[in-house]
């Protein structure tokens, strides 16, 4: 299987991953939003605590329900994804910067 790539303004051409917009903003804001993830399939997928509540409600009666339709995801490069994972899993994480930064870094269309 060919993994899709994304051209990130910060990291260049890299593998694609997905973050909910809350987790993407929290990379730089340092807000404790939680970090839930599924790396069992490519591309990796991660979401915050609020989006986890959406997942739990949507799959309560049907575990196969498409819960991600109720969540806004942003495609990011694999390096931005790992940065989010590292910062948001670490307790007490703070990261000063512009909260819109990672919303624009990986704002390029995916390439194959």
Image: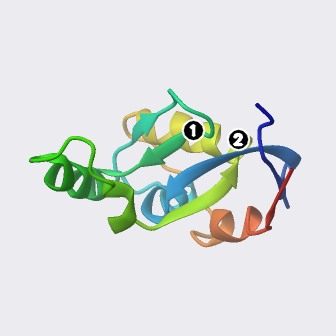
Look at discs 1 and 2 and give the one toward the viewer: 1
Q: Position of residue 100 (x, y in %)?
A: 61, 73
Q: Quadrant of the N terminus?
A: top right
Q: Is residue 91 above or below residue 98?
A: above
Cα gap from disc 1 to disc 2, whole angstroms:
8 Å
Q: Residue furthest left?
A: 61
Looking at the image, the residue that sits furthest to the top is: 40
Q: How many marks?
A: 2
Q: Which residue is mark 1?
A: 44
Which sits in the foreground, 74 or 80?
Answer: 74
Residue at 64 percent of width and 58 percent of height: 75
Callout 1: SS: loop
Tell me the tag on residue 68. Answer: none
The reply, left or right, for residue 59 in relation to residue 89 is: left
Compared across the picture, whether 29 is left or right of 97 comes to left
- Out of 69 and 7, give the one closest to the viewer: 69
How far across and how far down the image is residue 63, in percent?
21, 41
- What residue is shown at x 79% (from left), y 67% (from top)? 109
Image location of residue 97, percent across then percent down: 63, 63
Residue 88 falls in image quadrant: top left
Kindly state the secondary structure of the residue where label 2 is placed. helix
N-term-proximal mark, 1 vs 2 = 1
Q: Which mark is residue 78?
A: 2
The structure's colour scheme is: rainbow
**Where residue 111 sits: x, y (%)?**
86, 56
Q: Residue at x 26, y 58 (%)?
A: 50
Neighbour class for label 2 at 10 Å: few (<14), some, many (≥20)? many
Q: Contact, CB < 8 Å: mark 1 with mark 2?
A: yes
Q: Residue drawn 38% across and 64% down?
A: 69
* Label 1 crowd (10 A; few <14 / some 14-19 / many >=20): some
């Amino acid at each position: 299987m060919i993994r899709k790539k994304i051209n990130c303004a910060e990291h260049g051409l890299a593998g694609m991953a997905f973050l909910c917009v809350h987790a993407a903003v929290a990379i730089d804001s340092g807000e404790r939003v939680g970090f839930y993830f599924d790396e069992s399939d490519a591309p990796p997928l991660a979401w915050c605590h609020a989006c986890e509540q959406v997942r739990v409600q949507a799959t309560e009666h049907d575990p196969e329900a498409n819960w991600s339709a109720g969540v806004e995801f942003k495609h990011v490069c694999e390096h931005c994804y790992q940065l989010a994972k590292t910062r948001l899993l670490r307790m007490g994480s703070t990261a000063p910067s512009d909260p819109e930064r990672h919303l624009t870094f990986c704002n390029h269309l995916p390439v194959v």
